[in-house]
Structure formats: C-alpha cells, structure tokens
Image (cartoon, rainbow, N blue to C red):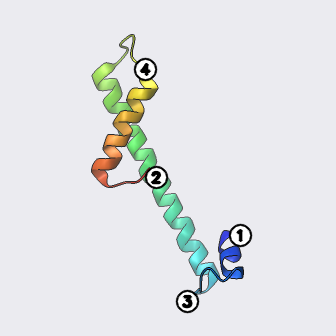
C-alpha cells in the first residue's frame, strides 16, 4: 500500500516490478526485526549477568541503556 501511494504521487519511479520491490522491502523489514530481537536477547543476558535481582535499579532503564550501547556498537539504528 505504501509503495503504491508513493508511486501514485510520483514520489518514486519503480525500475523493477512492484512485486519484486515489495518482496525486498518485506525481507528487509524482517531482517531488521530479527537483528533487533538478537540485540534484545543480548541486552537481557548482559543485564542478568551483571545486576541479576539487584534491588533499587530500574531494570527497564538499564535494559534500554544496554540495548542502545549494543546497537551503537553494531551500527544498528533503533
């Protein structure tokens, strides 16, 4: 739908069949989601190894900090 709207409004000119472009976009999105899931798993593992059940820490904030660091190190944009 997004691809069709972009083409309709003349914002893009397709140089390949729309089905092929659509498939490429889907594959790219799925790959991106898989990479982010791997970063999430690694961040959770690091969190558990380093703070475990420590009291007084904001686990979600720590998780996000670790996740951002891993993503930055990998050149992955969140």
Which element is circle 2 on? helix
Whole-angstrom CA distance, mark 3 to mark 1, is: 18 Å
Select label 3 or label 2 by which is in front. Answer: 3
Whole-angstrom CA distance, mark 1 to mark 2, is: 23 Å
Which element is circle 4 on? loop
Q: Are marks 3 and 2 in contact (CB under 8 Å)?
A: no
Whole-angstrom CA distance, mark 2 to mark 4, is: 26 Å
Dividing the picture into quadrants, the one containing residue 76 is bottom left
56 above or below 62? above
Instruction: Estimate how packed mark 4 is, as few (under 14), some (14 to 19) or many (20 or more) residues with alpha carbons within 10 Å.
Output: few
First along the sequence among labels 2 and 4: 2
Instruction: Indicate which disc residue 58 carries.
Output: 4
Dividing the picture into quadrants, the one containing residue 23 is bottom right
First along the sequence among labels 3 and 2: 3
Which element is circle 1 on? loop
Residue lying at 66% horizontally and 76% vertically, measured from the top left:
6
Residue lying at 55% horizontally and 69% vertically, measured from the top left:
25
Is residue 8 rendered to the left or right of residue 17?
Answer: right
Residue that protrudes farthest toward the bottom in the picture: 15
Whole-percent x and y of residue 46?
31, 31
Q: Are marks 2 and 4 in contact (CB under 8 Å)?
A: no
Whole-angstrom CA distance, mark 4 to mark 3, is: 49 Å
Is residue 59 rendered to the left or right of residue 73?
Answer: right
Which residue position is annotated with label 2? 34
Residue lying at 32% horizontally and 43% vertically, measured from the top left:
70
Residue that protrudes farthest toward the top in the picture: 55
Instruction: Estimate how packed mark 2 is, as few (under 14), some (14 to 19) or many (20 or more) residues with alpha carbons within 10 Å.
Output: few
First along the sequence among labels 1 and 2: 1
First along the sequence among labels 4 and 3: 3
Which residue position is annotated with label 1? 1
Which residue position is annotated with label 3? 15
């Amino acid at each position: 739908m997004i691809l069709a709207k972009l083409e309709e409004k003349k914002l893009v000119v397709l140089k390949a069949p729309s089905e092929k472009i659509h498939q490429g976009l889907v594959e790219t999105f799925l790959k991106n989601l898989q990479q982010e899931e791997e970063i999430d798993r690694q961040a959770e593992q690091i969190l558990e190894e380093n703070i475990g059940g420590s009291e007084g820490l904001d686990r979600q904030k720590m998780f996000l900090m670790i996740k951002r660091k891993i993503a930055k190190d990998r050149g992955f944009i969140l």
